Structure formats: C-alpha cells, structure tokens
C-alpha cells in the first residue's frame, strides 16, 4: 500500500518528465511506475484523486505539504539510487579514494532522500554484484550489462505488443558457420591402440557461412526457392549457405572476409525485404540482431572524433552551421574562434572542447550519424532492435544453429567436401519446422521471465510474467525514444561485437 507522500513524490517526478523531456503524461506515468515498482494504474488513480480533491489522501487526513515530502525519506532502492551507487563506486575507483557504507548512505540521503540502515546498504551492495575486499583497480561492469538487458526487454515487450496487434512481424536474424568436417568430438575408441583415436582428426576443413532469418511462424524462405550467393540478385528467401558470398556479382572473397557491411546491406535489400513483403504483406519489420560490426555499417558521411585534428573538428562544426557553443569551463566560443590557438589570451577552444562540442551536436541531432542499415529500415518505417552485447540467450535463432549443426554432424564422413556439407546444411535448414521456431521463441521468453524474477530484474520484478509487461507497454517507437532520453545505458561507444 503506497503512502500519500510516495504518491506526491511520484507526481513530482511525472511532471518533471512531462515539462523537461516533453513526454506525454501516459509515458511519464509508465516510466515512473517502472522505477517506483508499482502499477501505472495506481499512479493514475492518485493523480485523478488529486485533480478532483486537491489531495492524495484516501481518508480525512490533510494533504502532505512540500515540507512533509522533503522531510520524509524513502527506503526504496529505485533505479536512480542504483545509478548513484554505481557512480560513487566508479568515482572511487578512478580517484582511488575510500568509500564506506556510511558515506554511501549519507550520499543517498543527501541526493535522493533515501535513508537506509547500514545492514540494508550492505545487502544492496551485494545485490548489485559488488564485493568488499582487496582492491583490484578494475570496475565491475556487471551492473551495466543487467541494465542493458532490462532496457532490451522493455523494448522487446513493446515489439511483441505490436506483433500481437497484427501491425508488425518480429524477425530474428543471425550469422554462423560450419566446417566441412564438422562432427561430434566424442566417440568410442580403444585407448590401448596407438591409432585408436585417429578418427577425431585435426583438420576442420573449409568453413561454410550460414546466414538466415526466422519468425515465430518459421524460417523466412519461400518453398522451393534456391537463392544464389550473389547478393545483387533478388530472391524471396533469406537463406545464405555458401563458402563464398559475392556482393558485386563478380569478386568472391575467401571465408576470412565473407560477411562485410556491403554484403549485409545487399542481403537486407535483395533477400530480407522481398521475402517479408511476400510472406507478410503490409507488415512492419522489427529486426532483432546482434552487435556485429557489419550490422552497424557506416556510410561515407559518417563522422567520428577519433584521431581528428583541431581543424577537422572546427570545419565539421562550421559545415553544420554551428554558430557557437559553451565549453565545460563556461566560456562561449563563436565559430570565428573555433580554429584559434587555445594557448593565447582570448584564444579558441582546445581539441577536447571541440570534440565535446561535436559529440553534443551529434547527440542533439541523432539523424546525422545514421548507419546504413538504420537508414534503410527507417526509410521503410521498419525498426532495428539490437540485443545486448554477448547475450545470445535473447536470440532464438541461435538454437536453430545448434539443431542444424547437430544433424549435419551425424552425417559426417572423412571424405565429405564443402559442397556436400553445404547441401546437407541446406537440407537440414529446410527441415526446421514452424513448431520448432515457436518452441525456441518460447524458450527465450522463459529465459526473460527468469531474468525478470531474479535480483537482476530491477524494476521488471513487479511484473509476474512477460505477458503482463507486454500488456502495459507503449509503442516500440515510444520505448526507443524514452530509452534515448532517460535510459542510463545510452552510450556513444563505437565498439561492437566481433
């Protein structure tokens, strides 16, 4: 049962999101409810009661004053409280200062009016995967990984809601590989024989690339369609199972450079889009994929501050019609001073200040540095949904690879060549049934629910099932927009998975 003070404080947070970030009232209510671990309906009811009666009280008690709200500390571990703890620990690691439980408690009370006992603070630190011991001078990034997973789950739930309404289809895609001598690594042999285990062999043979996509209804491929490995040719099939893949129809690179950004773009344009438009006409594509570098293929106009000189940074800002910017030291620099010597009296900004100005401009104008896959999807009204780095449990098609490779391994023999292995892989891929695809999607949903109910679930623990989270989700576009504004995991880090 929430108190009047808690409802009043929540209303202040809601109005702050509405006034400062421009969110709708409903979006703000849902975001604050997730942080406060309560139902959005509860906050809406409290808001309506306040508008009608001028009070949050459900009885004859007088409404709380501002002084009451400021004096009444909370004992709840909110998302903001977790972020403050992570910030304090990180600063302690960077500056090599001592950080005690009492200091953490005092900062929480001062910054967020959260008053907890020392034992509670000790428990919170362990729940956030921190340990007290000999310094290792390495910040444990586990908290960031859990927050990234929670952020993905919120967006995925919104995607499921759009799919349930019949507005969109969720497509899961990935790449893998299999060697022509792929086989089981265990078998019967005689340990007394000097050649008893010779059949294991050391040579794996040539590598065959596998690229495909699926939905919960099955693999994305028309029946009896056999696509070529030339990605300039259009086929209504997402299957790509070859040892060589051509982007231009002429040159085939060896398997060390089989998948590149250009080839991935060719696959999207000439395989993914035609197939979905054929099998799911009129549906929006929500493409779930990992963080491989070629999934972030950048066009020729992409700009990064890495290894840029002062003149390059200044020229870029001028080309974007940036008239001036305010540096971290409070000084304002006009465009005429962008290239001026920073060491002279009344000079220009430093290289670091220019880099910061460029990053701020890119953050305020997200449409400038848009990757080619993102632009292709946006032009069609589609959405890219990236899974958190190195979390394969959230990608159901990974289990399809395991199924297919297991079947191909049983067919291996010493003289098998790449052509035979590729043919066997295509056959086993055709044997993947819609029932199996639905099963692996259900498996991922079960993993998500276990995560939601664990200590890593954070604000998601209030939802008993994934389905209940889906019911309260807004549109995916709104979730993506909220995440870009208030998601603590938003980062402009250029690193991606290999």
Image (cartoon, rainbow, N blue to C red):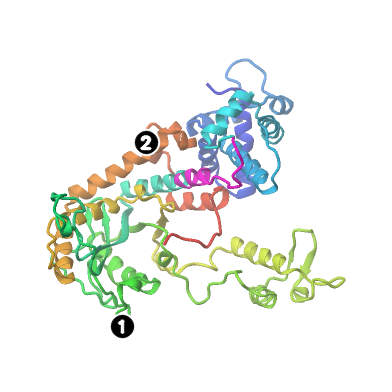
Residue 23: image location, x then y, percent: 56, 47
Q: Residue at x 60, y 33 (%)?
A: 10
Location of the C terminus (image quadrant)? bottom left
Frontmost of labels 1 and 2 is 1
In this rendering, the answer to whether 16 lies above or below 434 is above
Residue at numbered disc 1: 251
Q: Is residue 142 on the magenta stretch?
A: yes
Q: 92 left or right of 388?
A: right
Label 1 secondary element: loop
* Magenta extent: 133-149
Within 10 Å of the Cα at label 2, are there few (<14), some (14-19), or many (20+) other Cα atoms?
A: some
Q: Nearer the viewer, residue 370 or 88?
A: 88
The count of marks equals 2
* 316 and 254: which is toward the camera: 254
Are there few (<14), some (14-19), or many (20+) residues within 10 Å of tag 1?
few
Residue 176: x %, y % from top left: 29, 61
The residue located at (18%, 47%) in the rendering is 435
Q: Residue furthest right?
A: 345
Quarter residue 349 falls in:
bottom right
Q: Nearer the viewer, residue 111 or 157?
A: 111
Where's residue 239, x and y in %? Answer: 23, 65
Q: Which residue is label 2 attached to?
A: 450
Looking at the image, residue 277 lies above or below residue 38: below
Q: Viewed as shown, does residue 2 lie left or right of 66?
A: left
Q: Is residue 489 magenta?
A: no
């Amino acid at each position: 049962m929430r108190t009047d003070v808690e409802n009043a404080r929540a209303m202040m947070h809601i109005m702050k999101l509405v006034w400062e970030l421009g969110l709708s009232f409903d979006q703000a209510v849902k975001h604050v409810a997730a942080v406060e671990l309560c139902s959005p309906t509860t906050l809406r009811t409290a808001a309506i009661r306040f508008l009608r009666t001028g009070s949050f009280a459900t009885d004859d008690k007088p409404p709380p004053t501002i002084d009451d709200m400021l004096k009444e500390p909370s004992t709840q571990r909110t998302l903001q409280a977790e972020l403050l703890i992570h910030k304090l620990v990180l600063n302690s690691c960077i500056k090599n200062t001592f950080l005690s439980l009492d200091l953490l408690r005092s900062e929480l009370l001062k910054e967020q009016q959260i008053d907890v006992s020392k034992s509670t603070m000790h428990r919170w630190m362990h729940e956030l995967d921190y340990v007290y011991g000999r310094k290792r001078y390495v910040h444990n990034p586990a908290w960031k990984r859990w927050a990234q997973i929670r952020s993905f789950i919120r967006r995925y739930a919104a995607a499921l809601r759009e799919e349930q309404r019949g507005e969109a289809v969720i497509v899961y895609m990935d790449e893998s590989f299999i060697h022509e001598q792929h086989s089981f690594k265990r078998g019967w042999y005689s340990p007394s024989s000097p050649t008893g285990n010779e059949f294991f062999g050391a040579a794996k043979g040539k590598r065959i690339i596998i690229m495909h996509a699926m939905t919960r209804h099955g693999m994305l491929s028309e029946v009896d369609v056999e696509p070529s490995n030339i990605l300039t040719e259009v086929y209504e099939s997402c299957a790509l199972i070859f040892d060589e893949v051509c982007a231009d129809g002429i040159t085939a690179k060896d398997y060390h450079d089989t998948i590149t950004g250009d080839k991935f773009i060719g696959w999207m344009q000439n395989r993914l889009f035609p197939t979905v438009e054929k099998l799911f006409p009129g549906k929006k594509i929500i493409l779930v994929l990992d963080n491989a570098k070629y999934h972030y293929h950048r066009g020729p106009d992409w700009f990064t501050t890495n290894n840029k000189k002062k003149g390059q940074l200044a020229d870029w800002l001028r080309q974007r019609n940036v008239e001036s910017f305010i540096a971290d030291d409070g000084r304002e620099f006009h465009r005429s001073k962008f290239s001026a010597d920073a060491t002279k009296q009344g000079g220009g900004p430093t290289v670091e200040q220019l880099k910061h100005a460029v990053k701020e401009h890119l953050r305020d104008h997200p449409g400038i540095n848009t990757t080619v896959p993102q632009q292709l999807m946006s032009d069609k009204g589609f959405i890219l949904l990236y899974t958190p780095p190195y979390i394969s449990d959230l990608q159901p098609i990974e289990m399809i690879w395991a199924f297919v490779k297991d079947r191909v391994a049983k067919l291996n023999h010493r003289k098998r060549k790449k052509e035979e292995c590729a043919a066997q892989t295509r056959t086993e891929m055709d044997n993947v049934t819609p029932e199996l695809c639905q099963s692996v999607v259900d498996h991922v949903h079960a993993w998500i629910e276990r995560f939601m109910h664990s200590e890593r679930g954070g604000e998601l623990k209030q939802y008993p099932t994934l389905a209940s989270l889906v019911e309260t989700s807004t549109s995916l576009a709104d979730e993506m927009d909220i995440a870009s504004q208030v998601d603590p995991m938003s980062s402009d880090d250029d690193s991606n998975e290999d």
